[in-house]
Structures are given as C-alpha cells and as structure tokens.
Amino acid sequence: MSRSGAVIDAHHLEVTLVGPGLPSVADLRLTTTGDPDIPLEIAEVLFAPEKTNTVIVTTATTLDTKGSYQLFHQATGQWYAIAPSLIGIVISLLLAAALVQNFVFTRYLGLCVFFGVSRKRDTAIGMGVTFTIVGFCSGLLAWVLDRYVLRPLSLHFLEIIVFIGVVACLVQMTDTIMKKLHRTLHKKFGIYVVLITTNCIILAVPLLNAMNASGFWESLALALGSGLGFALALFLMSCARERADLAPVPLIFRGLPIAFILAGLFALAFLGFSGLQV
Amino acid sequence: MSNAPATAPRQMPAPPTRTLLWRGFFAENPVFRLALSLCPAVAVTNSVKNGLMMGGAVLAVQVLSSMTVALTRAGIHDKVRIPIYTIIIAVWVSVIDMLCAAVAPVVYAEIGLYIKLIVAFAIIISRLEVFASKYSLIPSTMDGVGMGLGFTFAMVLIGALREVLGNGSVWGIPLVDAQPFLLLILPAGGFFTIGLLMAAMNWIDVRRGNPLSTGGGCH
C-alpha cells in the first residue's frame, strides 16, 4: 500500500482515489495505522478543487498532522495510506531529535558524559564531533541487525545484549582504525571515542528505533539528529560553564551543582522549541 | 615493580557489613556524591512511584551482577574483564526489563527505555570493577545492596520533592490543595532539584567542617 494522501490540518485530509466518483461518508472507514479496530468519525467528503479523483475528507475527530492513517473504501475494497511525505518525516525527525526533543535537555540522556566533558570548549567540540560520527554509524548498523537478523528470527528479546555489543565493537574498531590510519587524529579524538561507550544516547537510539519499528530513513534521521543535538547541547553548556568558572559562585554551588542549575536553565530555554513543527 | 600492588587488593579484608550497607546513602551516594548514573535521576523522578521502580530495578541489577562477578571472578581474565562485565550486566538487565514489563506494565510504559538503559550506567560497572572483582560473594552482595539502596534513596528523595512541590501529591495521592509549582515536574525541574540537593549536601559537609569534595562526573 503506497502513500496516496496527506493530512492537511487537524480536521482535513486529502486523498487521491484510484477510480472516479465521490464516495459517501458511510462508504469510507478511516483508522489510525497500527490501530485498525477504532474507526475515526468522518463528517464530510468533498472533491478537491482543480484536481481529478482527489477528495478532501473532513473528520470530526482531531487528527495528528504528523500521524499516519489508513482509509478503506468499502465499495471498491481499496486501501489508501495517508502519511506525511518521506522528506517531511526525515526533516521533522531530525529537527525533533536535535531541538524539540533534544536528547540531553528533554530526554535527559547522556548526562554523565555531558557533565563530564562540558568543562572546556575544546573538549566539548571534540566529543560532539566524535559522538555524532560514531553514533550515526552505530545507529545504522544496529538498524540493519535489528531489521535483518533480530526481527526475522524473533530474537528481539536479545536487543539489549546485541546493541551494546554493536556499540562496543564499533567503538573498539573506530579506535583501532584511527590509530592505524591517522596518528594525530587519534591523539586528538581517541580519548573521546573510548568515552562514547558510557554515553547512553548511543544505546538509546537503536532501542528507540526498535521500539517504534522505524524504517531506514527514520532511523537515519534519529541517529544523525541525536548526535547533532548532543553536540549542540555540549557546545552551549561548555560556553556557559567557562563563564561560570570565572563568576563568583557561592562555595557550596561550585562545580556540579551550578552546572546542574545551568542545565536546568538550558532545558527551560529548549522548551521554547516545542512549538516548532514541520 | 613487584607483584605486590597487583595482588594486594585481593587480600584486603572487606570493610564491615555496616559500612557497606550505609555508605551508599550519604558518604558515597551514587547520584549526589559520585555523580554517576545521572540520566535516570533526572528523567524518571517526576513521581515517587517511577523513582522507586527505577531504584528497585537498579538495585536488582546491581546485586545480581555483583553476585555473578564475585562468583566467577576467578575465571575472568583481566584483559577481557570489561566486555565480560558488560555482557553480565546486559543479561541481567534483559531479565529485569522483561520482569518489569510483566509485573508493572503501566509504570513500565513510562520508564521502559530507562530500564533498558541501565546497561550503560556507569555506577553498576564501576562497582563490579572496584569491588565485586576483588572480594568474595557475601561482601560483594552487601556492597551491591548498599549501593542499590543508596541509589533508590536518591531516586525516591528527588521523586518525592518533585511530586510534592510540582504536583501537590505523593504516590499519586493528593496532599496539598494549593496551586502546584509546575516547573518542578517539567524537564528542567529535575536539573534544578538535583543541583539544589547537591548544594545542600555540600552545605551539610561545610557545616560539619569536612573539606568540600570536588564533584566527579563519570570519566
């Protein structure tokens, strides 16, 4: 079932039908994808202006503009999939992972490394870059393993063990390859590569992908977005902490307590992104 | 160098059980003092119930992994010990994960991801490395129990503070009828609460005349 329509706004969706003719309201059955037992109420069906075979369906229930739905035309026995376009999904997921649902500030993942290496700007940038690259690779590798090995064999209960294995192997491999190929690069970034194992974001990405049964492009967007979001958070935090080091902070707040307060302020600021939608 | 430094820790007598059980609460609290496993401490502590379940899961994984390592440490070669520890933890996390999903599906739906992520917690592997790989079964178990309880204590403390102030209730039971301080159950609230609690612990230390411990971070 290929994509043949899109949600326009909270109460309207547009579908291109296979045959001509306007279906009646009672003839259509609209459900959320993955939940085919609960039909959503349809109020009205109209032809879209200036388009052939395309109808606008008005619903009584509020629709999620980023959700995917299925429309069943009972007279023809035809299924229609209503979903956002692929590029839309990828960009919105990328933005969501990096900003709206930033892994550090709204999902609170990777905090150990976040507080550990955000003391200086140089180390923050090094860690951010290294993590984005390794996280991207491990996300893709884990997706391939999940889709082509774990799922066909019904071994998904082993996902934790397999994913931690993937991460550990990849980190070790990156370290070895970098050491052989580029000495200076290894000297500069080697320490961060080793630290990546303790970053829970790198494990959360494949777990989230497996939990949502994401497709290839969605997994790719999440893997890249999480890395970029982490790098951004790390950079912002290191700038703030460098200044906090020079400020007359009360004795009992020095070190980690003030870093936590700063992170809280950043988290508040990141709430502002929650209105951002694509 | 002689072999003495390498073998010395293995022959060291274990600290008394009392110390093992209590040091997790204040002196070496995993969250406030060692600053390890911070992710769940911020993420799932918007209510006491979530905090307690997370703490319980960590306690179980810590004790079971410590016991496993203490029993098998003779057979684990030093060079491959970290991967082996990781696998041991991953196995027990899988077990606890499935158990939680079966026993408390409602809470699990909210904190399931963080239970799976116990596998990446620095606190567990650091206890295996620092303690369980050097001592026998009973002290290792006690150390696991102590650290697990200390972690649970921190989770419940943060959870209670945030739930009372942010939602006006404890364990879902409404206590005060006032307008709650919504900020504390928002994502940012967890950071503020932990920052203030860490500062409070530092303040108690200063009042007692102890030198300030410099905060860690797990690296």
Image (cartoon, helix red, strand yellow):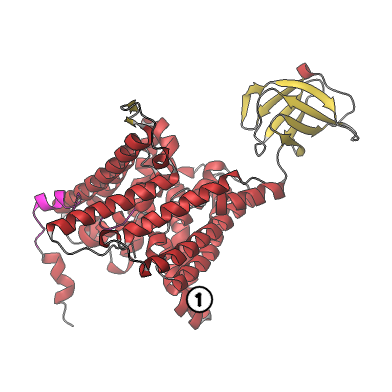
Does residue B140 appear in the picture of this structure? yes
Q: Quadrant of the N terminus of chain A?
A: top right
In reply to whether residue B121 is colored magenta, the answer given is no
Magenta part of the protein: which range?
B13-37
Residue drawn at (11%, 53%) of the image: B19
Q: Nearer the viewer, residue A1 or A13?
A: A13
Q: Residues within 10 Å of mark 1 (few under 14, many from 20)?
A: some
Residue drawn at (53%, 59%) of the image: A227
Does residue B91 appear in the picture of this structure? no
Chain letter for the residue marked with disc 1 in the picture: A
Task: Using the rendered view, name the quadrant where residue A123 is placed.
Answer: bottom left
Give the left or right position of residue A268, taking residue A273 as reference.
left
In reply to whether residue B15 is colored magenta, the answer given is yes
Give the left or right position of residue B87, taking residue A202 as reference.
left
Q: Whole-percent x and y of residue A51?
A: 89, 35
Q: Whole-percent x and y of residue B119?
A: 37, 52
Give the left or right position of residue B118, taking residue A155 as reference.
left
Which residue matches tag 1? A178
What is the count of numbered marks? Answer: 1
Q: Secondary structure at mark 1?
A: helix
Residue drawn at (61%, 54%) of the image: A220
Q: Is residue B201 above or below residue B44?
A: below
Residue drawn at (44%, 74%) of the image: A190
